[in-house]
Amino acid sequence: MSDRLLDASVTDGRLALAAAGSWTADRAGELERLVETALRRARGVPAESRRVEIRMAGVERLDTFGAWLLERLVRSLDASGREAAVVDLPARYRTLVDVVHTANRTPPARVRPNPIAEALARLGATVVGLVRDLLLIVQMFGELTLVALRTAAMPWTFRLTSTVHHLDRVGWRAVPVILLMTFLIGCIIAQQGLFHFRRFGVDTYVVDMVGILVLREIGVLMTAIMVAGRSGSAYTAELGAMRMREETDALRTMGFDPLEILVLPRVAALVIALPALSFIGSMAALYGAFLVCWLYGGMSPDVFLSRLHDAISLDDFAVGMIKAPFMALVIGVVASVEGLQVKGSTESLGLHTTASVVKSIFLMIGLDGLFAMFFATIGM
């Protein structure tokens, strides 16, 4: 066995390995063979002599490959029931050997969790997250109410220019997509109603269904969902980007309230725009239903308008319009909460933007259900 690289000797029944020379990648083949020979030699030593010393005093050069080979030798000896110990390692190589040892450390075996306990843990985390989100929304609503009251007491502090700017983005620029989507929804509802009601000879009742459904539910709800996806996500992304660039912290440092400057104008624009968009969307849906009833169902315009006049009332229109500002508040508050929680990464921005839309839609549907029960109770 080479006395330059690795020499094995047995003294008093104990195995000792003496390394020397250059333990580098250019001697890889020879070192591999010597290490395998040393391991076979170790297997022939009686098991009572468990300790194996690897003496490194004679090593002149050591690179990453040599350190990895030394680590492999130690691990193989330990796995065979020996106690390998590296001794007399030159100080200049200790850091390299330690780094290689740390990098090649075998992770502990993963303990498979109890599926029931894991499911309960996930359920608990979900409940805690829901409660936390609800508290944050209530907190934001309370703070925003205080800011609005303070602004009402000092109207000259209201950011009118910012509000008009956001009103243009949220309201006027959203009209085309709202018109298109609600028009198509009205067409689809009317077509399906005609298709099924015609079997019973009551195809004129589709006008009642469309009128009541659009004015009370579909018009405002679909408009709010589209605004949440279009404007709510934009609000979250804008506020989140400001958080990432620490602009909100800069405002606080200068003595400004970010809620007054950034949040209140956006929420005010939503509260103003959503009722108007809901009205436009409801009219577009009714017009789409009218065209389908006329062109597809053969119903004359006079019959459609007469039936619609008899089917709906001012209460139906009022129900939809009353819901709109509250849904706008939900969109604005949730978007602001999520935007101001963004951390310093684009991943966080994407997650909170997605959460903003999902939570807004969920809360609006829940709010719509509460309004439905409330209006049914008071007879509207």
Image: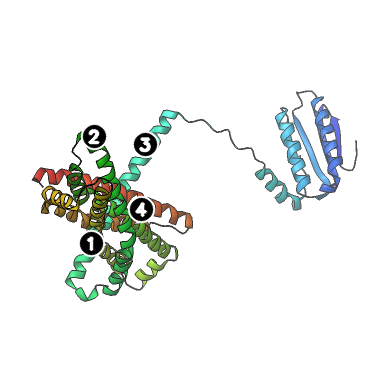
Mark 2 vs mark 4, CA separation in Å = 43 Å
Please tell me which of labels 4 and 1 falls first in the chain: 1
The x, y position of residue 56, in whole percent, is 80, 44
Q: Is residue 190 left or right of residue 19?
A: left
Residues under numbered marks 2 and 4 in contact, where contact means CB atoms less than 8 Å apart: no
Q: Callout 1: few (<14), some (14-19), or many (20+) C-alpha neighbours within 10 Å?
A: some
The image quadrant where one finds the N terminus is top right
Q: Callout 3: few (<14), some (14-19), or many (20+) C-alpha neighbours within 10 Å?
A: few
Q: Is residue 69 left or right of residue 124?
A: right
Mark 2 vs mark 1, CA separation in Å = 37 Å
Q: Is residue 302 above or below residue 80?
A: below
Q: Is residue 74 above or below residue 321?
A: above
In the structure shown, which secondary structural element does the residue marked by tag 1 occupy? helix
Mark 3 vs mark 4, CA separation in Å = 21 Å
Amino acid type at mark 2: Arg
Residue 276 marker? 1
Please tell me which of labels 1 and 3 falls first in the chain: 3
Residue name at image x 28 percent, y 57 percent: 140
Q: Is residue 86 left or right of residue 323?
A: right
Q: Which residue is mark 4?
A: 356
Q: Which residue is mark 3?
A: 123
Please tell me which of labels 2 and 3 falls first in the chain: 3
Give the mark toward the camera: 1 or 3: 1
Residues under numbered marks 2 and 3 in contact, where contact means CB atoms less than 8 Å apart: no
Amino acid type at mark 3: Leu
Residue name at image x 51 percent, y 30 percent: 112
User: Which residue of the protein is positioned furthest toward the left in this rendering?
Assistant: 379
Give the mark toward the camera: 4 or 1: 1
Q: Which residue is mark 2?
A: 199
Mark 1 vs mark 3, CA separation in Å = 41 Å
Please tell me which of labels 2 and 4 falls first in the chain: 2
